Image (tube, rainbow, N blue to C red):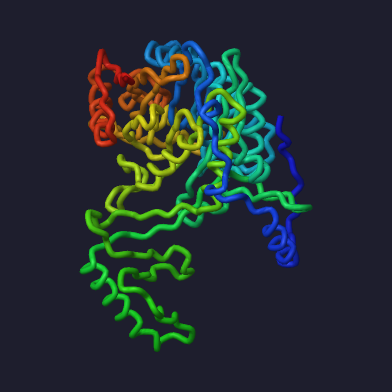
Amino acid sequence: MRLHNPTIPAEIDYLKFIPFILLAACFLSPASAQNAPQLLPRDQAVTILGTFTVAAVGDLIIRQPSSQLADAGLQAALAIIREADVAIGNFEGSLSDMKNFDGPMRGFMGTHEVAPDIKAMGFDLMNRANNHLLDSEYPGMYSTNELLEEAGLVIAGAGKNLDEAAAPAYLELAKGRVSFVGMHTPNGVASGRLAATSQMGNLNGKPGLNMLRYSERIVLSAEQIGLLRQVRDQLFETTANYDNPRIAPRNEPDNLLEFYTSSSGREDPVFRVAEPGEIPGTIDFSMNPSDLDRILRSVRNGKFYSDFAIATIHAHQSQSVMERFHSSTQPPEFYVDLAHQAIDNGADIWVGHGVHTLRGLEIYKGKPIFYGLGEFFRQMNWSLQAQLGIDDFTTSERNGPTPQPLESLLTLSTYQDGELTEVLLYPIELRHNGPDSRLGIPRIAPPELGQPILQRVQRLSRELGTEIDIRDNVGVVRIN
């Protein structure tokens, strides 16, 4: 059991610690990935013999227990999860004993009964590195983590400091040990508050999650960059109106442009000229090297001490500025690179979630990469104020076809003597046409709803080099 109640002083004069922190960093900075130890083939292999199955879903946003519901579609999905050797999801939101919880209750706050209910569904592992970790501040994070662990679930990706949040967690099974590393890429500068920091000396470190930071540049044609530069330069002609104007950039290369859109300057976009073959509007992400090294080290260490390694991420980033946020069906280039590097460093499966839609499946070096599984539970329509009896409920009209946020996948990956042999994809529908009391509760989608889901994932996966057969309302990937 982790310790969940560190004492955090309200105010600390951090400036006086800076010289000591910088000095310690010279000696304590982690080795770069180039100097990192490499896994031997014997340690890289899946060492669980016989048949081994992994069920994976995306986000679980649950406010009330649901596993007892006598519904054939739900129970069919839960049967697949329960029969798997290990089942993983991303728990997004907070849990508490609401009658006795002293912290702020905000966001997706669910009752304490949800934690054992998730275990009763058959889940074993829950990622906690996501953008809703601190909806109810640190008390909500600690309450949720404690309840999940008390229910018998293994959590990863968040903790009392970065060392705990980044470390691999382990699940002991009769067939072998499973390691589990969770991470999150922030939704802009404001999400930086979610990042945990390392313990150093007497400084405990800040609670939070295992963050993979990045910088980004928006790709434009040379002509578009030129036009945008003209607009920016014309704006600088107005600086005589201000006592403390911004200073025009100096020595700016022709292929780069910073355009000022924020008074703080923290989220000003940077543009660069497209290289041959690049589409204008594409976002060029660069992963923070220190964060990347830490994450890959955790994946390697987890694999070294386990028989099967899982890496999972909650990420919302789009491939292009022309896609709606949360709705990008194609993974950005950095995300593909990250998943590949994780598998190169020992991960046996990659599970992605965060975007409110589905993405494709890739088989890389015989290992499955799920770039976006959608939301398995989505009880977001519940109002906490109405739940507590202090406000009226609100409802919305749900006409027309099922929106993509109410569609997801339940996946089952089968390994035989250490080799991936098959991936099954079960279409999930979250009751778009049902009453509000059932909205967001998953079920195996009936064929008329399941076929379009599978066909879309089939198309997106083909773009990633993976062929999916659709048989009896199930997507099937056979590994040669």
Q: Give the number of marks.
A: 0
Question: In x, y percent, where is residue 203?
Answer: 75, 53
Task: Report the side of 461 relative to 303 (left or right).
Answer: left
Q: Quadrant of the N terminus?
A: top right
Residue that appears at 59% across and 26% down: 306
- Quadrant in which residue 397 is drawn: top left
- Quadrant in which residue 80 is drawn: top left
- Quadrant in which residue 152 is drawn: top right
Q: Residue furthest bottom?
A: 240
Task: Report the side of 438 relative to 108 (left or right).
Answer: left
Residue that appears at 44% across and 10% down: 70
- Give the vertical position of 112 relative to 31 (above or below): above
Residue that appears at 40% across and 58% down: 216
Residue that appears at 45% across and 25% down: 56
Q: Nearer the viewer, residue 52 or 322?
A: 52
Q: Quadrant of the C terminus?
A: top left
Task: Report the side of 384 relative to 272 (left or right).
Answer: right
Question: In x, y percent, where is residue 248?
Answer: 40, 81
Res 150 seen here: yes
Question: In x, y percent, where is residue 234?
Answer: 29, 81
Q: Nearer the viewer, residue 387 or 225?
A: 225
Task: Report the side of 476 relative to 209 (left or right).
Answer: left
Q: Nearer the viewer, residue 170 or 30?
A: 30
- Give the vertical position of 172 relative to 137 (above or below): above
Res 140 seen here: no
Q: Nearer the viewer, residue 148 or 308?
A: 308
Question: In x, y percent, where is residue 210?
Answer: 57, 44
